[in-house]
Each structure stands twice: as C-alpha cells, then as structure tokens.
Image: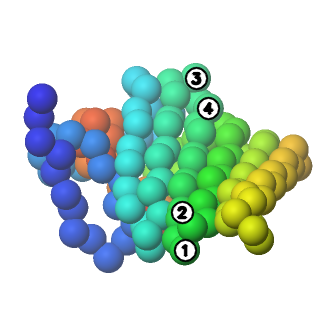
Amino acid sequence: MRALKVLTISLLAFLSYGTYGASLRDTTFSVNRRYYAMVNGSLEKWDFNKDGSFLHQGVNGGSGTSVRGSERGTYSIQGNIIVLHVTKKTTAFVTPGSRGTTQLGAASNAGSQTRKMSIKLVGNDGENGVVLNG
C-alpha cells in the first residue's frame, strides 16, 4: 500500500495517492476517481465517474451532533474549470435529545443547481489528487 501524499495548499485539496504533477483536459476523467479531504473539521469525499457522474459526501460532527450531507449529479471539465450540475441533495442529522433520547432528521431536494469551480488535476488525469476552489 502506498502512502497518502498530503498537499499543503491554500485551496481546498482533495487527495489521492502519488506524486505531484499536472494535467488539464476538456473532458471528464478517463477512469473512476475518489478523493478525500478534511475541510474545516468536516470529512469530504468526492467520487468522479468516467460516465460523467459524481457523488460528493460530507460528514461533520461535534458536541454529540453528527451531520451528513450528499449531492450527486454530472460534471464536465472545461479548461481549468469544473462545472457541476447537481441534481439531488440530501442531508441527515443525529443529535442528543432530552432525558437520554436521540433526535434524528433528514431532508432531500431533487432540484437542479449548476456550480463552477476552478480545478487543478495532480498527476495524469488527476490520478494523484485534485485541487478545487470555489
């Protein structure tokens, strides 16, 4: 098993395995990629699939409360910009209640949203990581 390389960058860095390099393409990744990062105390996971779909999940917790969110949709890379077309968002939480009870909650949204972020692929087609900002 290879060691996970940590990139110290002022932008949001999603990490995979390998060494530093760069390559940008005007297409989707040619293979499936999964990236992880800790962002402001939240664990984030991004899955980019070669069919142009993505899944973004985040888990955050503190003081006994845990919140998990996810969004899915399609993506494309245009130069150094990634365009995300979000088609579904879900959020769930668990928190301590009164007298030893636990409160649960969830929400789902099937609306459509488009976001753009700058992207830098690390390694060939992002095999060693990706840096997102936006």
* Residue under the point 45% across and 57% down: 43
Label 2, secondary structure: give it. strand
Q: Residues within 10 Å of mark 4 (few under 14, many from 20)?
A: some
Tell me residue 28's x, y (percent): 50, 34
Mark 3: secondary structure: loop
Near mark 1 (Cα within 10 A), the count class, few <14, some 14-19 or many ≥20, is few
Name the residue carrying label 2.
60
User: Residue beneath label 4, please?
Assistant: 53
As helix, strand or loop, the secondary structure at mark 1 comes to loop
Q: Assess whether mark 1 and mark 4 are in contact (beta carbons under 8 angstroms).
A: no
- The residue that mark 3 highlights is 51
Question: Could you tell me residue 84's position as x and y percent?
Answer: 64, 49
Q: Position of residue 133 (x, y in %)?
A: 47, 67
Work out whether residue 61 can be spotted. yes
Tell me which amino acid carries mark 1: Ser
Q: Which of label 2 and label 3 is nearer to you?
A: 2
Q: Quadrant of the N terminus?
A: top left
- Which residue does the numbered mark 1 point to in the structure image? 63
Q: Are marks 3 and 4 in contact (CB under 8 Å)?
A: yes
